[in-house]
Amino acid sequence: MGDYKKSITVQVSAPTLFSYLADVTNLPEYMPRLTSARPAGGDKVDVTAHINPEGAPEQDVEGKAWVHVITDGRKLEWGAAGPHDYHGELDIEAGPSEGNSVLTVGLHTERTEGEQVDRGLTETLTGIKDAAERAARP
């Protein structure tokens, strides 16, 4: 079992970043393997991912996830069904200077490959930063 946490500064205001992340249809813009994300009622999200499993052909797989949007405190909690008890949270705070924010991702997973998980968190944070900054440009 492992708990991981990592942060990044994003050149977008905290309210703008929160609004962007709260819209689950934006997920494929910053999650590299996701090809679609559709609200499925309440906090449920239907997702499709393109995967390339070792020893098997590339394929598209569909799954169910959930996202709780917590407006007070600008936080999102999320998770997906599966064998690794995969869930986490995104916290958005005002950044060190005007117009930017600090995004922190926390992850809980039964997988304990720390280095691989750390790389994945860095990839995710960088993807969110790039996508949110791109979306905020006029």
Image (cartoon, helix red, strand yellow):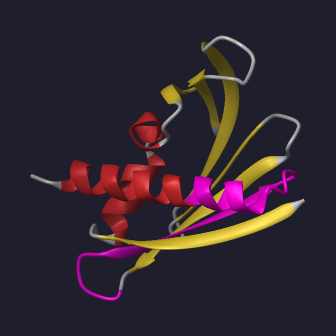
**Quadrant in the rendering for residue 80:** top right
Residue depicted at 68% across the width and 35% down the height: 65
Q: Is residue 70 above or below residue 134?
A: below
**Residue at 66% in and 71% down:** 5
Q: Which residues are magenta?
A: 96-121
State the residue in front, 130 or 78: 130
| Residue 40 in sight | no
Q: Is residue 1 left or right of 54 when viewed as pictured?
A: right
The residue positioned farthest toward the bottom in the image shown: 96
Image x and y of residue 17, in percent? 36, 61
Does 99 lie within the magenta span? yes
The extreme front residue here reads: 55
Q: At which x and y percent is residue 81? A: 80, 35
Relative vertical location of residue 106 with respect to residue 58 in this rendering, above or below: below
Query: Which residue does the image show at 62% across and 45% down from the upper left?
Result: 67
Give the left or right position of residue 99, taking residue 115 as reference: left
Query: Where's the N terminus, which quadrant?
Result: bottom right
Q: Could you tell me how many numbered marks the image carries?
A: 0
Image x and y of residue 134, in percent: 23, 51
In terms of depth relative to the viewer, which is nearer, 58 or 63?
Answer: 58
Q: Nearer the viewer, residue 126 or 11?
A: 126
Q: Quadrant of residue 9?
A: bottom left
Residue depicted at x 41% and y 39% = 26
Residue 107 lies in magenta, yes or no? yes
Q: Residue furthest left?
A: 138
Q: Is residue 116 visible?
A: yes
Percent coordinates x, y for residue 19 in the rendering: 38, 54
